[in-house]
Amino acid sequence: MDKDCFYSIRMRAAVGDRQVSGAERIVTPGKIEAVVQSLVIRARQKKSMPDRIVITIERLGTIPLRMQTALNVVTVNAADVAAGRSAAVKILHSLEVSERATMSAMKRLSAGVGPSGQNLRGAMIIDALTGERLEPDQESGVRASRFDWTDEALNDITRKLETIELTHFRTREALALATKVAHAPCMVAELCWSDDPDYTAGYVASLRTGYVRFPMLKARGDPRGGRAFFVDRKKLDMQALVHYLQIEPMLINETGACGQAMDAEHYFK
Ligand code: AMP
């Protein structure tokens, strides 16, 4: 596929200084107008009209466009938030994220990651062994960007996720993000839960486990959320990692398996 024929389109909507909506696509030139319109519609779907909607349209440069297969998806049901978090911790430990690193991330995500307890725009990068935060800008974190599904893969994943009753657009977007993040060379695992007070789901993702979704990783009404990318420091080149996450484009052209939901006991058997 000719990489010069693709554009990155990114939308950010804000009320005052607070981002209320964001999305991005990678498309061929013929789709730009339609995609821009759909992103504006998306930005206006929030309860109140944003003060500002910024759309960036950028031709992908000479950096190769990677093709990737999406992570497999499985849902693990747990009785409540505490049981969900404890299952997430168990999976992180099985991936060799240390107790210290797991607790450091869980504590920060629960309390609000930013200096005054607010959410970060991007993710924390955490040493999977020591739990230290490593990202250069700790007020913003690092954002993963420039990833999308091909039209065929998007249709396919939408259909597969529907068969397991996952119809929310957030799942497709988080799965694409998690697929890009998991393929970073030094990445051990990702932990995420949303900052949307109405959206309680979260996940642990890695190449080894796939995308393990928990319907309840935080209480309804809680506005705190975030992402932790756990890295192997021995393999870490921070500049290369940030470049990979922010700049190098990735399209998902193959979907993985989407398994039926199971409870935590069954998952760990
Ligand atoms: P969301 O899943 O969109 O509710 O996002 C939850 C949290 O993940 C946000 O508060 C950010 O801290 C972080 N986040 C959102 N989008 C990204 C991204 N593209 N890259 C890295 N972190 C992100």
Image (spheres, rainbow, N blue to C red):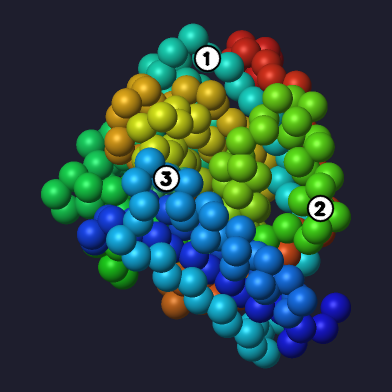
Q: Is residue 229 left or right of residue 187?
A: left
Expressed as whole percent of the image width and height from the top left, the position of residue 29 reads 73, 79
Q: Amino acid at mark 1?
A: Ala
Q: Residue at x 69, y 20 (%)?
A: 261
Q: Amino acid at mark 2?
A: Ala
For residue 196, which quarter of the picture?
top left
Q: Nearer the viewer, residue 252 or 52?
A: 52
C-alpha distance separating marks 1 and 3: 30 Å
For residue 8, which quarter of the picture?
bottom right
C-alpha distance separating marks 1 and 2: 30 Å
Q: Residue at x 52, y 14 (%)?
A: 78
Direction left: furthest residue: 116
Nearer to us: label 1 or label 2: 2
N-terminal-most mark, 1 or 2: 1
Expressed as whole percent of the image width and height from the top left, the position of residue 80 reads 44, 13
Expressed as whole percent of the image width and height from the top left, the position of residue 231 reads 47, 56
Report the residue marked by disc 3: 46
**Disc 3, SS:** loop
Q: Nearer the viewer, residue 94 or 60?
A: 60
Is 121 drawn above or below residue 66 in the view shown?
above
Report the residue marked by disc 2: 153
N-terminal-most mark, 2 or 3: 3
Q: Nearer the viewer, residue 184 or 153?
A: 153
